[in-house]
Image (spheres, coloured by chain):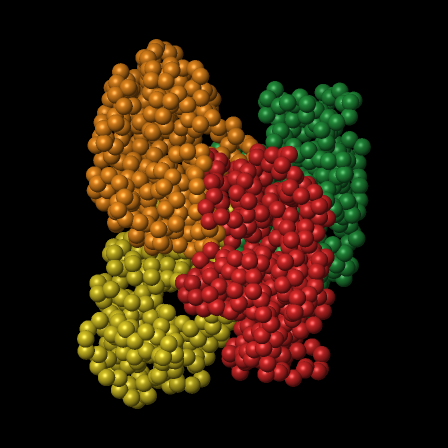
Chain colours: A yellow, B green, C red, D orange
Amino acid sequence: MTSTIPAVPEQMRASVLTAANELAIENRPVPVPDADQVLVAVAAVGVCGSDVHYYREGRIGDFVVDGPLVLGHELSGRIVAVGSGVDPARIGERVAVEPQRPCGRCEQCRAGRYNLCAYMEFYATPPIDGAFAGYVTIQSDFAHALPDSVSDSAGALLEPLSVGIAAIRKAHIVPGSSVLIAGAGPIGIITAQTARAFGASVIIVSDPIPERRERALAYGATRVIDPMTEDVVGLGVNAFIDASGNPRAVDSGIRAVGPAGYAVLVGLGSPTMTLPVEHIQNLEVSVTGIFRYTDTWPLAIHLVASGQVDLDALVTGEFGLDHVREALESDRDPASLKSIVHPNA
Amino acid sequence: MTSTIPAVPEQMRASVLTAANELAIENRPVPVPDADQVLVAVAAVGVCGSDVHYYREGRIGDFVVDGPLVLGHELSGRIVAVGSGVDPARIGERVAVEPQRPCGRCEQCRAGRYNLCAYMEFYATPPIDGAFAGYVTIQSDFAHALPDSVSDSAGALLEPLSVGIAAIRKAHIVPGSSVLIAGAGPIGIITAQTARAFGASVIIVSDPIPERRERALAYGATRVIDPMTEDVVGLGVNAFIDASGNPRAVDSGIRAVGPAGYAVLVGLGSPTMTLPVEHIQNLEVSVTGIFRYTDTWPLAIHLVASGQVDLDALVTGEFGLDHVREALESDRDPASLKSIVHPNA
Amino acid sequence: MTSTIPAVPEQMRASVLTAANELAIENRPVPVPDADQVLVAVAAVGVCGSDVHYYREGRIGDFVVDGPLVLGHELSGRIVAVGSGVDPARIGERVAVEPQRPCGRCEQCRAGRYNLCAYMEFYATPPIDGAFAGYVTIQSDFAHALPDSVSDSAGALLEPLSVGIAAIRKAHIVPGSSVLIAGAGPIGIITAQTARAFGASVIIVSDPIPERRERALAYGATRVIDPMTEDVVGLGVNAFIDASGNPRAVDSGIRAVGPAGYAVLVGLGSPTMTLPVEHIQNLEVSVTGIFRYTDTWPLAIHLVASGQVDLDALVTGEFGLDHVREALESDRDPASLKSIVHPNA
Amino acid sequence: MTSTIPAVPEQMRASVLTAANELAIENRPVPVPDADQVLVAVAAVGVCGSDVHYYREGRIGDFVVDGPLVLGHELSGRIVAVGSGVDPARIGERVAVEPQRPCGRCEQCRAGRYNLCAYMEFYATPPIDGAFAGYVTIQSDFAHALPDSVSDSAGALLEPLSVGIAAIRKAHIVPGSSVLIAGAGPIGIITAQTARAFGASVIIVSDPIPERRERALAYGATRVIDPMTEDVVGLGVNAFIDASGNPRAVDSGIRAVGPAGYAVLVGLGSPTMTLPVEHIQNLEVSVTGIFRYTDTWPLAIHLVASGQVDLDALVTGEFGLDHVREALESDRDPASLKSIVHPNA
């Protein structure tokens, strides 16, 4: 909302994945917003496990990187230009970007499940470029205004918080619920905080690494479990959320769910897993997963602005655009939780 | 409703499973109804796969037959006596028995999920005796009055119809839904009929046996598939219901489900199965099972009385109490679909 | 799908409401479809009570006719041209038109409630023209292909059937439900048929006019009631649907609903009504209304094509474009149920 | 849990309503618990508006006091004896009493809606006696164990908190919801606190009395409105909860609800009210009420024990059994919020 918005240049720098493990800084034209879009100068971009996976493997399942791709889909920034159909008063707004463009017309969109849109264009998913770049475009409705109390980095991390919100909603967490979360990485920690904000009274986090269990206790867990030494089977929780992708954690986690409970698989592991079907049947447990999110940014902003979820504290490293490789490699450090890239820093 | 109710004897005959594959006719005292119960002279009892399983293996999962057990839990009959708290006007009523006695007070019961009652007493589940006997008792509320238009055999088969109704409800079938059903045995056929009654517009039944596929077409299927030669993956149905217990059918059936659809596992197979987790996640498919049923008899009676579901036509064999063994063995005949025992015939 | 599509002229005839009770035939340019739209040569248009209301009063509530307006929003036709973004293969298709254009981007649209879109453009609602004209445009997704078995008139009446479907969904009608419907006009009759298709086992229709009660019995009602002589209070039905707009019918209808049941107000009456709040509270009845519909045409087409709902039989008058006045006045004949205008006949 | 439980006497004192405005202390036999019940020595009883209403009018709607009646249904105490079917280890437990005895078997009970049980026995509702007495009986499952951190008075006030929870659930409040609450009396204040615990981000309380608005701000309201000077119509909240019983507040409150929102009428006013039907229809608002509660005590205890809801601070007066009249009259003091009777003090 400041008065001086810098002029938008014609060229910008972008960090481009040219092949597995190959990154290059390129000069590219600044994109031009469509009529319903805004142009955002990128302030902060979180590094996601999927970015790392594309970087290392060149693919995620059926999504294959077969041309140059800009990674990064967790981001905040400032609107610097708008399309012809957008109110110019938005120029200058600090925003968090919901990095998806559903068609708005297909059966899934019309039913309110735009995350399952068959025609989705999603940032940093081939062939759609992401946000490790100076500027990006997004339709105006998906550029969510940020209050001053939410930092650029927290604004970027509203994206993984949206994953946590989507998971908690699918898990039917309400005040008084009990929930088991497997995995105390970024998604597990954010999901624990979200569970607390949704009123869960019992929040158990399992992780084999002591430091990560410690961290979970600081961010909402009411109890932590080392799955190497303690069994979760039979806990009888209302919901299990997997944020590990580990097949053994998924199996035992589902067995931890009580009658008519829910299991939500968030972590990406293998395309198939052996699941405890008899337990699912005998207790009528519902098992499902989440695929992105719908309508989460307004709540995510509220949770952070009201202090119910702390995202800034999750940041363990910050990098410029010339150091995206280090940001992508930082997960090798067990003390690292969340790395942020500042493309225009 | 007739005027002459025969006097209730002190003794009755019962077909008792004494060990795996061992059946004996015993004379037993006629049970005495509790205050809230009625005494039912058994007219017809359907043979269920679970009866056959107990007969052959002496157990189902954790439920072990370690004493004499009377099998049979699909039944109709006539009320011949009532407990002290039941209106004597019920004597003479033809009834179908909902063969379960939940506690009515635990957390699951209070939440309306009495099928998941931790204190359930269920017919023909060790150590509770079932209905291959002259008389049984049941709480009055679970003895559902039968109209004249519903035969004794159909009255007995309201129990598997209740399974079908529970499955269709869990699968969220509404008018216009598409559903894939794996397995054209009794449950598959009944489920197909139920899907039709719930308004499903596309009802696909898969079964490797041609005769069973033929039968499915006669009972509601709009299309049949031979899974040996045709793949169901990618059908994009709203719901999949497994009535086969076959792991390959379950895996491919789940892959047949479209965005935000449901998979309901009814068939009993192995305690664990390898499931397509990536498909579940990417399309947010919900996978669950059913365990018995709640509040199904009134609807089941309506569906049969109104001609929307035909249960009589499923009966392929009828037996007296001295021939329970033949009834239990009849599943070896591929032309057999449903056997009925008439304990008092 | 025939091979010869007539050339699209530059001009068309339209029946225009110029003031209350004033209609004029005008020559107007044939509209040009936007990129995502199709041009439909109108075959049949049903006359709705709202058309009659605009014609007589010049307004409905806050919607005021303050310029020339083409009425008519229940329609079928044939695609004769397509916008630049639509597959030209659609030209020649017989279609039913869902006569609304939601924005697809606002909060309500994103949540799957596009009927509540704040930016809705709806046919025959000022200032948007309707279908008493030779040609109309509609976005391609809302031009629903008609099978040969559905007539032009039935195709037009899929719109009121959509109202019935929306009402039945809101009323939570499932197989075995009991429902009371007040009013045996077009919406009441269609709603009764829809209730039957959704499996309701008890369908009670109340109407003070004997002929209309007779008709209700022919179209799904299992019982009819003359509200002048018989009280519905205490029926204890699962749901009440008002299709009368009559405050007394609404009051007694809500009192007819049993514990945890639903009341859905479809009929337009006065902006406020005196409702039985104590009954609503003591039985936790949910009272709501419907505003248009979402995602109903595919089901409506299935219900008609499969013979579960008969729309052709409701047509009691057919008119050319020069006789729209007679069509709008036909409701004065108590034997009239539904009038159809054929603009190109 | 202490070791010394005082012997249970044969007689107890009770405050009995003998006619409107007539109270008398009587000696009565201590009740004997049924097999599934416990005997509770009453520690604290909250005074509810319905107690006051029975006291002043001798009736509430169809419920008429036509014999001596003990009032009081908000209570805590200590188990001093148990029925034959209850674990004697419960003797000594501090408990809050859920003051209702549903049948557990009827259609509503089986569906999980035991609050709507047609055979309900509810404390202080003719002819069932309440808790202004030394001892009461309750089935063991409805005597909810209290942690030490919850005081006797707070234990009693879990009952109005249960009303608040039931209202918030019906209003579909989730994190991020906006809600308008009319009336800042005890129920309004408790509901505001509950809304905050359920994550509502906007909690608007309207009340014409400045002191009550002040109090609302201290207990969860994010904004207060004086309905005499400011209009709530058009606020567009997700939910409206009436805790006033005032017809004008109900009318304007419903008009404050946005698209697809909820209105829950908790306050008891007149049996009928004039409601804004056009608004209900055009925005598809759902209007309903609550009648008691199901499954609320465990959550209520958690909310108080965790400090999310403060009940102790609502207590503005405490009385012995000889001063029940003063307790019932204390609502005439505008500074009074909640009075507590200690029958055994």
Left-right relation of A92 to B242 = left
Residue at horizontal 52 percent and vertical 39 percent from the top: C251
Residue sitting nearer the eye, C24 or C137: C24
Residue at horizontal 32 percent and vertical 42 percent from the top: D182
Instruction: Return the x and y of residue C113 as percentages of the image width and height.
Output: 47, 60
Location of the C terminus of chain C (image quadrant) = bottom right
Location of the N terminus of chain C (image quadrant) = bottom right
To which quarter of the image does residue A158 belong? Answer: bottom left
- Whether residue C181 is situated above or below residue A81 in the rendered picture: above
To which quarter of the image does residue B66 belong? Answer: top right
Instruction: Return the x and y of residue B334 as percentages of the image width and height.
Output: 77, 54
Residue sitting nearer the eye, C162 or A166: C162
Residue at horizontal 52 percent and vertical 57 percent from the top: C57
**Residue A252 appears in view:** no
Instruction: Return the x and y of residue D250 as percentages of the image width and height.
Output: 38, 42
Residue sitting nearer the eye, D135 or D293: D293
Residue at horizontal 42 percent and vertical 63 percent from the top: C118
Instruction: Return the x and y of residue C63 as percentages of the image width and height.
Output: 46, 60
**Residue C282 appears in view:** yes
